Image (cartoon, rainbow, N blue to C red):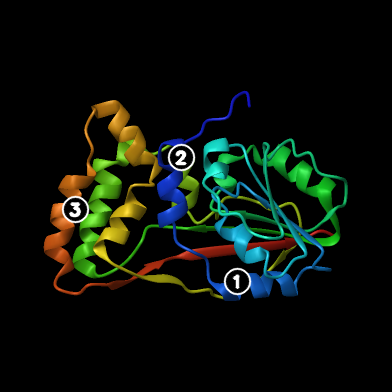
């Protein structure tokens, strides 16, 4: 696909295994604001975390991504069709979708063109939901190490689009009137090894490795191990920002 930059092909398998799952309450709430539960489009699906959850509420979920590597790592789920296509040029029928979701991916899109596609494929009173999550939080001393790694070690290696995630999509205008979202809790009970797997999926880690011919994760793991303590698992949290807009 001309012009598509795949920031996660290097970690497609790890992405599927180590990215966090979204709270079940989110999908129940999204379904409650859908005009029907016939069909949903999860755009920028990656390895399909959101698409699999949507399948519990919709008869059919169309999960699309421009990354063939990511789609190849997705889990086969009844009711979910995985298709390789760009967000801005979807081969979907007019007014065929009750809900369009974009999980942690809107910052990669040409939003003006994507919103035009959304307007074409959404049914009247259909909804567009986008969400993002920021830097992980665990415990003050661990968080201090992670913030230094995020901002200082990897600072120059983040794609420019990442800044929109750091701002919680606050500077993005959605194309329809918005419906206020309740607060959702996004958390997991992880071991240090699971945290390391998640960090290995960061796009800046891949860019750092290519630019410096060095893997920054082993050094980070040593520092984290000292701060982690004797607990096998810790509660890991992410700030989850959800925005929902309904087509008139």
Alpha carbons under labels 3 and 2: distance apart: 21 Å
The reply to whether the C-beta atoms of the residues labelled 1 and 3 are less than 8 Å apart is no
Q: Residue at x 76, y 56 (%)?
A: 176
The reply to whether the C-beta atoms of the residues labelled 3 and 2 are less than 8 Å apart is no
Q: Residue at x 72, y 60 (%)?
A: 79
Name the quadrant of the C terminus. bottom right
Q: Residue furthest top?
A: 2
Q: Residue at x 78, y 42 (%)?
A: 116
Alpha carbons under labels 2 and 1: distance apart: 25 Å
Label 2 CA crowd tier, 10 Å (few <14, some 14–19, many 20+): many
Which mark, residue 26? 1
Q: Is residue 1 left or right of residue 148?
A: right
Q: Earlier in the sequence, mark 3 or mark 2?
A: 2
Q: Is residue 169 left or right of residue 15?
A: right
Which one is in front, 23 or 60?
60
Alpha carbons under labels 1 and 3: distance apart: 32 Å
Q: Residue at x 74, y 51 (%)?
A: 175
Label 1 CA crowd tier, 10 Å (few <14, some 14–19, many 20+): some
Name the quadrant of the N terminus. top right
Q: Residue furthest left?
A: 226
Measuring from the top left, give residue 165's x and y in whole percent.
48, 51
Q: Is residue 25 above or below residue 171?
A: below
Residue assigned mark 2: 8
The reply to whether the C-beta atoms of the residues labelled 2 and 1 are less than 8 Å apart is no
Which mark, residue 221? 3
**Which image quadrant for residue 125?**
bottom right
């Amino acid at each position: 696909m001309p012009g598509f930059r795949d920031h996660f092909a290097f970690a497609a398998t790890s992405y599927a295994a180590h990215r966090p799952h979204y709270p079940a309450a989110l999908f129940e709430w999204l379904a409650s604001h859908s005009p029907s539960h016939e069909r949903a489009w999860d755009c920028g699906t990656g390895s399909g975390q959101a698409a699999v959850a949507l399948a519990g509420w919709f008869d059919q979920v169309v999960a699309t991504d421009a990354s063939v590597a990511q789609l190849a790592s997705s889990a086969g789920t009844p009711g979910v069709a995985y298709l390789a296509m760009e967000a801005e040029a979807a081969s979907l029928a007019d007014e065929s979708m009750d809900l369009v979701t974009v999980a942690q991916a809107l910052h990669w899109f040409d939003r003006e063109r994507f919103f035009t596609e959304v307007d074409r494929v959404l049914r009247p009173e259909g909804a567009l939901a986008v969400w993002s999550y920021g830097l992980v939080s665990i415990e003050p001393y661990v968080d201090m190490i992670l913030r230094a790694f995020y901002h200082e070690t990897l600072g120059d290696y983040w794609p420019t689009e990442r800044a929109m995630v750091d701002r919680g999509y606050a500077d993005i205008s959605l194309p329809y009137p918005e419906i206020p979202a309740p607060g959702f809790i996004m958390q997991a009970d992880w071991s240090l090894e699971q945290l390391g797997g998640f960090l290995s999926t960061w796009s800046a880690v891949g860019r750092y490795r290519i630019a410096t011919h060095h893997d920054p994760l082993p050094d980070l793991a040593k520092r984290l191990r000292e701060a982690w303590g004797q607990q096998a698992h810790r509660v890991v949290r992410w700030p989850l920002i959800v925005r929902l807009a309904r087509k008139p």
